[in-house]
Image: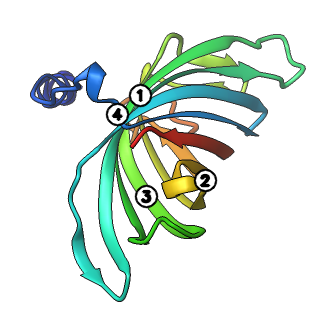
Amino acid sequence: MKKIKNFILISLAGTSFNASAVDSMSIEGGHGNGIDVGRVGLQWDWDKQWFAAHGWHLGGYWDASAGVLHGRSGGPVNNDVADFSVTPTFRYQQTDLTTIAPYIDAGVGAHLWSRTTITQSIRSGTAFQFGEHVGVGVRFGNRGIYDLSYRFQHMSNASIKEPNPGLSIQLVRFQIHFN
């Protein structure tokens, strides 16, 4: 586990996030496994277009978020757990943002929880979690300034340490692009 933590810290340290160059911000909410989720985030575009063809391309962005996982199981243990994450996300999207532009995206990143117990049935062996998501959405408005999407996300510690119940959530996300 120490090797994984060191790898993540080195990877994050090698990534520069220039706060003045934030490309968008987001707010998302959802639920799953007896918890409610709320997050805010900042995104930095990679400014790359791969496999451009027929008005579509593959791009991506860094997504840094902070939020709360709120247990609502009705049992004796219900904690509010802070969730901090950094996720590189790939997005296959329409290149023309002058109309409604659909997309799909997917990412795998790192999450750090403030506690390892959210509800009686969601007790993780580690505060470190992997988080992967897939989503579909649409950009709209002048130059695609607005972004609305649905995401399915799964978080777990990949059996680094037991227990590892995993957590699957459904999210609705609204994002505003600045450029």
Q: CA distance from mark 2 to mark 3?
A: 10 Å
Q: Amino acid at mark 3?
A: Ala
Q: Is residue 168 visible?
A: no
Taking 105 as reference, is 114 above or below it? above
Q: Earlier in the sequence, mark 1 or mark 2?
A: 1
User: Residue sitting at 60 percent across and 14 percent down?
Assistant: 81
User: For the C terminus, which image quadrant?
Assistant: top left
Nearest to the eye among marks 4 and 2: give it.
2
For disc 3, the neighbor class at 10 Å (few under 14, some 14 to 19, many from 20) is some
Q: CA distance from mark 3 to mark 4?
A: 23 Å
User: For the N terminus, which image quadrant?
Assistant: top left
Occupied quadrant, residue 92: bottom left
Q: Which mark is residue 106?
A: 3
- Mark 1 sits on what residue? 85
Q: CA distance from mark 4 to mark 2?
A: 23 Å
User: Residue sitting at 52 percent across and 25 percent down?
Assistant: 124
Question: Where residue 150 appears, x then y in whole percent?
Answer: 65, 55
Q: CA distance from mark 4 to mark 1?
A: 18 Å
Question: Where residue 157 appears, x then y in whole percent?
Answer: 42, 35
For disc 1, the neighbor class at 10 Å (few under 14, some 14 to 19, many from 20) is many
Q: Amino acid at mark 1?
A: Ser
Nearest to the eye among marks 3 and 4: give it.
3
Q: Which mark is residue 152?
A: 2
